Amino acid sequence: MVALAVSLCVSVPAWAEVADVVLKDLIAQSDVIVVATVTKIEPAPDHIRAVEERYPPVKAATARVVETWKGPAVKDVRFVAAPTQYCDTAHATKGEKLVLFLERHGDGPMMIAHVGRGGMSIHDVKGKPYVTVSDQVILPRGTRTISETKKDSVTLPARLREPGKKGTVTVDFTYELRSIELGTLRSVVCPEKPRDADTRRQVVPRDR
């Protein structure tokens, strides 16, 4: 996913850059927020197309909902699981478990919010579930995260690096993977409301 994002951001005009988003704004712009496991990957409907032919074929994913954090409780969600525009990081693989911030666009598959940044993969760290969060998603101050250094490479058409040049070029890069505990993210996205018993003043009967 990172390699694909790098390839689609090469030589992109400044106006196409993706701005950072505060988590509370990502929550607000999402119609549905769920924890789900991807069960199917298939071609997206014909009307969903990428901005350029050089993009890979657009895919749609179906995922079985494990938890609902926002929106109506449903059994499954369907969403676009491939880039459709510049610097789009939308992605999913069969069997992958994700936290999904999704936006509705008509009756077709939903879109991952904020150009794919609302798709957050879940993985285990020392037996605990952690969620990978893009650096462009600004978490509340003081939120504890962990960081892992990853290495990757991507092969690009040489013309994307040097106009007029033929062949391909391989770009090596390193990046930091930032993750947050699933339970911590859950508590931020859908904080529990105080129970009625806790909000009512408790009256202690006096001894007669």
Image: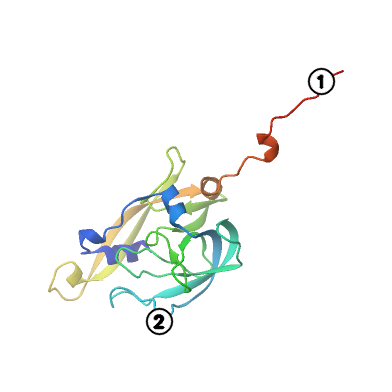
Tell me the quarter of the picture where residue 106 sits: bottom left
What amino acid type should be assigned to the residue bearing mark 2?
A: Asp
Q: Quadrant of the N terminus?
A: bottom left
Residue 145 pos. (x, y %): 45, 44
Q: Residue at x 32, y 55 (%)?
A: 174
Q: Nearer the viewer, residue 115 or 1?
A: 115
Say which mark, if any, is on residue 206: 1
Residue furthest bottom as drawn: 46
Image: 56 above or below 101: below
Q: Secondary structure at mark 1?
A: loop
When the figure is inspected, residue 65 is found, relative to residue 145, above or below; the finding is below
Residue at the right extreme, as displayed: 208
- Secondary structure type for disc 2: loop
- Taking the view exactly as shown, the residue that stands out farthest to the left is 164
* Amino acid found under the numbered disc labelled 1: Arg
Residue 204 or 141: which is nearer the viewer? 204
Residue 77 image point, x, y percent: 54, 68
Q: Which residue is mark 2?
A: 46
C-alpha span from label 2 to label 1: 73 Å
Image point 34% across, 51% down: which residue?
20
The percent position of residue 205, horizontal first and vertical second, equals 81, 24
